[in-house]
Amino acid sequence: MEALAVVVVVGCTAAGVDDPAGDVYFPSSPGTPAGGTLPDLVLGGATVDTTAGELRLEFEFADPVLPADDFSDPYKQLHGFVDIDLDVPAVDQKNSNKSNRSGFSSFLGIEASIDFSFVAGGVAPLSDSSGSIVASVPVTFSGTSVILTIPTTVLSGLGTVGSTIAYAAYFTNTLQDTADVFPNGDGHLISMPPTAPVPWMSLPGTGVALGLLLLAGVWTARRRLSHVPAA
């Protein structure tokens, strides 16, 4: 009898890194809490999927955020930047929006950045290290989550794309009077490789063992039912 193989596939999602909730601050006074106001980032992450040919960045906020071209509630519009450094570790620390605008340093020398102030029609402008726009990339807003998908073919025109990248972010509200940085304080993060499909119980013969376990579970359940007193 041929053994049954069971495979559980884990999706390729960005590894999440927590950001303290309620740490929104005043850009004019970095480190001074501004209270529970937008944009309060609580989780973020990035993966480089060389098979799919994309860099995926995911951000989760405490409250819903809107793209810059959605004026249904201007106060909820998300502005700011995501910095991308293709060199890991960073070799030329300059041009980072987090370093130059937020009051905190990212220690990055970026090859690319995303400007959320110019998101329109579901795409965001991607600029090179000089600030020149070189491409438009998909961005999805859904309640409290924001997902950027950047083709590695676009990044390869700016530098060598490896299995990881370094990144940091600086987000502000519409008036740019409250902000949040990611990661919190100084520093940057390294992307995680996507989670590969994980074969579970797919070794020779394990299908037989799984079948026996299922049969044992059914037999135990029937025994328990047979001992239930009649109402």
Image (cartoon, rainbow, N blue to C red):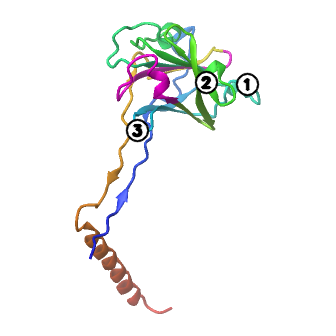
Q: Would you say residue 57 is visible in this rendering?
A: yes
* Residue at the image point whose x is 50% and y is 7% from the top: 100
The answer to whether residue 162 is magenta is yes
- Residue 147 location, quadrant: top right
**Relative to 52, 121 lies left or right:** right
Identified by mark 1, the residue type is Pro
The answer to whether residue 63 is above or below residue 90 is: below
Residue 124: mark in rendering? 2
Q: Assess disc 1: are there few (<14), some (14-19) or many (≥20) residues with their C-alpha within 10 Å of its C-alpha.
A: some
Identified by mark 3, the residue type is Thr
Q: Disc 2 to disc 1, how far (Cα)?
A: 18 Å
Query: x%, y% of residue 197?
Result: 36, 49
Query: x%, y% of residue 119?
Result: 65, 24
Q: Which element type, helix, strand or loop, lies under badge 1?
A: helix
Q: Disc 2 to disc 3, how far (Cα)?
A: 23 Å
The residue tagged 1 is 74
Query: x%, y% of residue 212?
Result: 28, 76
Which residue range is magenta in the image? 150-175
Q: Which of marks 1 and 3 precedes in the sequence?
A: 3
Q: Nearer the viewer, mark 2 or mark 3?
A: 3
Residue 51: mark in rendering? 3
Q: Assess disc 2: are there few (<14), some (14-19) or many (≥20) residues with their C-alpha within 10 Å of its C-alpha.
A: many
